[in-house]
Amino acid sequence: MNLKRFLSIPILGVLLLLGFVYYITVFIFIEDWIGLQSSSGSLNAVIFTFLAVSSLFSFSVCVLTDPGHVPPSYAPDVEQSGISDEETKAKIVQSKICDRCSTYKPPRAHHCRVCRRCVLRMDHHCLWVNNCVGYWNYKAFFMLIFYATIGSIYSTIIVITCSFQKDFNGHAPLKVFYVTCGFMMAALSLTLGTLFGWHIYLIIHNMTTIEYYEGIRAAWMAKKSGQNYRNPFDLNAYKNITLVLGPNMLKWLCPNAVSHLKDGLTFPVSRDNS
């Protein structure tokens, strides 16, 4: 574990935001709305605490987990490709060499300019986790935005409900604080919800963010030549989901339950790539 990854201004910003949202939700708005000593207040506090802790745990796993590096001994196996032409084989091998690393690159791996290495099934380099999001920590990243989205929506409902029931009695500064918090939480919920929806789409279609944009170009090129492009890694919705979250649904919500992952060097492809 590289704990030095936490020594980053964006990460400290995320932790401060999480702490701020937790504090105002539990100790200001729930307390002011129904009181923490009441049974309903305690229940709401426990639920939100669970979401906050789950977000923090997922965040930590995403930060500390290596997304996946290419083994030094890796080389593409073109002998099993069914291609007999030696010149064609040579071109295939050449196309799988990273220009920057000068080493072989597995399918779905991409070179990260920030990390200065090739990352397995790279989705993107995330400033907010000070790490690449790739093969081994993509599930943790997805669970992070899942818990953070649910938590922010939950907090938004509490803040808005409390604001409508609050009698400010001419206390303008307090009213400004409540309204500002409401807008802030609504904006945070919308931002995280959009990001969460985007990655649901990617998982269902078994794509990374990089592959999505590469697919747009590939589809355009295929259309120009009168052909149809299909993502070769798109099996079906359920299989695509289990490839990321795992076959056991009871472990889907656990960000570090990744025993279903293999080596990240090969991936199942659809038989019909036409």
Image: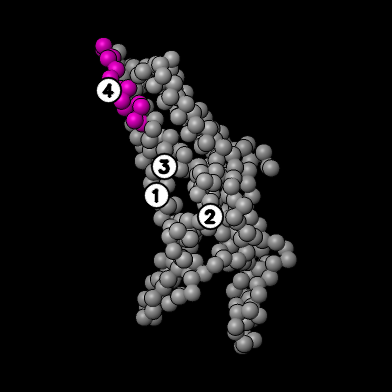
Q: Nearer the viewer, mark 2 or mark 1?
A: 2
- Magenta-drawn segment: 156-170
Q: Is residue 261 above or below residue 84?
A: above
Which residue in the protein does label 2 denote? 247
Q: Amino acid at mark 1?
A: Gly
Residue depicted at x 63% and y 46%: 65
The amino acid at mark 3 is: Leu
Residue that numbered label 1 is attached to: 197
Q: Residues within 10 Å of mark 3 (few under 14, many from 20)?
A: many
Locate residue 241 relative to residue 262 in the image: left or right. Answer: left
Q: Which residue is depicted at the point 59% across and 42% down?
A: 61
Q: Earlier in the sequence, mark 2 or mark 1?
A: 1
Residue at 27% over, 23% down: 164
Q: Residues within 10 Å of mark 2 (few under 14, many from 20)?
A: some
Which quadrant of the figure contains the C terminus? bottom left
**Residue reaching furthest bottom?**
85
Counting from the top left corner in percent of width and height, residue 6 is at 62, 37
Q: Quadrant of residue 112?
A: bottom right
Residue 192 numbered mark, or none: 3
How far apart are the alpha carbons under marks 1 and 3? 9 Å
Looking at the picture, how far across and down is residue 7, in whole percent? 63, 36
Disc 2 residue type?
Answer: Pro
Mark 4, residue position: 164
Q: CA distance from mark 2 to mark 1?
A: 21 Å
